[in-house]
Amino acid sequence: MTDELLLEVRNLTQYFERPVSWLERVFGGKQQKSRVVHAVNGVSFAVRRGEVFGLVGESGCGKSTTARTVVGLLPPKGGEILFASKDITGLSGAKLTPLRRKIQMVFQNPYASLDPRQRIEDILTEPILFHESVSRADARERAMALLDKIGLHRDQARRYPHQFSGGQRQRIAIARALATGPELVVADEPVSALDVSVQAQILNLMMDLKDEFDLSYLFIAHDLSVVRHVADRLAVMYLGFVVESGSSEEVFERPLHPYTVALLDAAPSLAKKSKSVPLTGDAPSPVNLPPGCPFASRCPKSRPECETERPTLREVSESSGRLLACHQQ
Amino acid sequence: MPAPLLEVRGLKTYFTLWGGVVKALDGIDLTLGVGEIMGIVGESGGGKSVTAFSIMRLIDPPGRIEAGKILFEGEDLLSKSEAEMRKMRGRAISMVFQDPMTALNPLHTIKDQIDEALRLHTGMNERERGERILSLLHEVGIPNPEERLSSYPHQFSGGMLQRVVIAIALAAGPRLIIADEPTTALDVTVQAQILSLMEATVRERGAALILITHDLAVAAGMADKIAVMYCGRVVEAGTADSVIRSPAHPYTRGLLNSMPSAAQTKGRLAQIPGVVPSLLDLPPGCAFAPRCELACDACGAGVPAMVQVEPGHEAACFALNGGGNI
């Protein structure tokens, strides 16, 4: 790992507007205004070359939206995205194409992310042929080499996705991501649809491939033990905000934000039979963001200023690069 | 020793498909005492959910319970008529499903759905039922239950809905609750809420609970006993502590080792090689043998029987038949 920043995300904002439907226009009294879902609210983080950066949080916290915005599937509504020090914010069309080669994505559900009507060899050669001017035979040879790397047999190349198990399909999805020779792989919950024993296989494979192909990962997961295992550094998200970030060792050993503490407490583990009091309530709606700290409504340590003033993400110790957004510290 | 609440003996549930017979349950034994919490763990295809549906007698064609006994309070559920079963379901044994969004009827209010269970299974009049609904909602931790009575399922979050489902399951005071992956669809912090709620209500009422989960850590956190299933068989069963601390079956050990843990943060995870075989094409003998590092000739020849590892803890593995350590 070097200190060179491969991906830098600054103040990223993403929201979705839900227009008023005709039914509401005709019948609805109070819902005449369009509703805005604030999915990502000024998120900043950086992925260094060669590291695994984890993005953790519960559903609805904006981690997948962040990932989709970073890879260019959604145009950002605000903020900047820098890749290898080049501003790539809001690039589209032909300008985005060369970047897609360098930033690839692995999705959560390998049953949905592979085209059921394409053979495996076509799934793997298509990105190569699209991005590079090589002959079909060369592309095919490279696809076959990828199959070796992910632990599938070359004679399985003419099969269709439905002939493979979930774990094998996720291997294929990973191979497809690697086909273009990316530098950054954005993996959105790559193992959460898989059984535990298969999950271990895929995590091991991803770590092996990272070393072999000099990859960096933006690794998104809700499972803390998985993130702890793979990530060098991580950011914890809540309601579209980063509430805490730092090296994964430090965050797990000494969580500072009350939400991180609660999240770690809530995770079931074999070791502890803890009976700590779980968090009450649910996360607030991203349609009506609370004016103060996003976590104030569920925070056991909440004080009056937490309800009114939104804490900013700031450094808590210079040496470790630990960031925290909380009024308490 | 008092008679167990539930005794499953040699239960076989087969599904007859075009491609052959799927032996989803191939002779399983389970014993559950009054007020006990049992975790059934294993990966998909192990037969956990089929076990739950077999106990409830909710197996539809092409599935069929081929053999075995399900003794609930001494009576064999398999010899009961459908009408008798209907009186048991919800009253003596109730169920909590994985996805609360689909377990409830979107067209009825929460009140109506809890009321249905009370109307069918208790002799309460309308006023008593109304009070009972409020106290149930209060018990499962729904804030302001009076105001939520006339809400529809879509107006609740996933965690709140699962609380409603639990309230329905508790309504008629069952002696056994079967929860099939009750927190898999929920977030970690909500999962912690629901698990502690389930444990508290079950213990308080002295009801027994079968908790089906793929997450060994969830089972370890609240179960008294754990049964590990693989390809339609129980491969290991015992008290939760002994199964987690000293797993005897290579599959259980593989599962435990492949979980990323705090103790071993970096480096490679221990993995179980290969994949779960198709139930249509099971290997002969022990189904785990092709993935097992201890497999020997005997494993391919016959199915190992459960042997005692220590008192209250048994496993089905030929490597254990020597009676000692592997």
Image (cartoon, coloured by chain):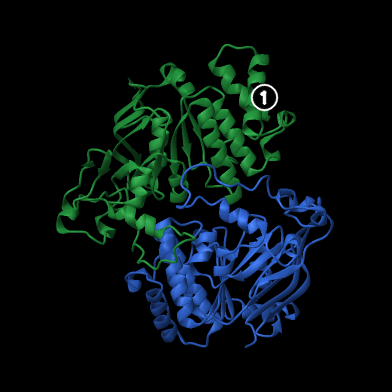
Which residue is under mark 1? A144
**Quadrant of image for the N terminus of chain B:** bottom right
Which residue is nearer to you in this view: A148 or B109? Answer: A148
- Picture coordinates of residue B22, whole percent (x, y): 77, 57
Question: Under tag 1, what secondary structure?
Answer: helix
Which kind of residue does numbered mark 1 sit on?
A: Met
Q: Residue at x 68, y 29 (%)?
A: A119
Q: Residue at x 38, y 48 (%)?
A: A57
Q: Please determine whether, in this image, residue B314 is positioned above or below residue A62.
A: below
**Residue reaching furthest right?**
B301
- Residue B43 shows up from this direction: no
- Picture coordinates of residue B277, whole percent (x, y): 72, 49
In which quadrant of the rendered view does residue A279 lie?
bottom left
* Image side of residue A73 versus residue A145, left or right: left
- Picture coordinates of residue A271, whole percent (x, y): 47, 61
Q: Please determine whether, in this image, residue B109 is positioned above or below residue B115.
A: above
For label 1, the crowd category at 10 Å Cα-Cα, with few meaning under 14, some 14 to 19 and many 20 or more, is many
* Image side of residue B189 versus residue A112, left or right: left
Q: Residue at x 36, y 66 (%)?
A: A276
Which residue is nearer to you in this view: B277 or B319? Answer: B319
Mark count = 1
- Picture coordinates of residue A196, whole percent (x, y): 57, 51
**Quadrant of image for the C terminus of chain B:** bottom right
In which quadrant of the rendered view does residue B43 lie?
bottom right
Chain letter tied to blue: B
- Residue B142 shows up from this direction: yes
Q: Chain of mark 1?
A: A
Question: Chain A takes which shade in the image?
Answer: green
Q: Residue at x 41, y 85 (%)?
A: B127
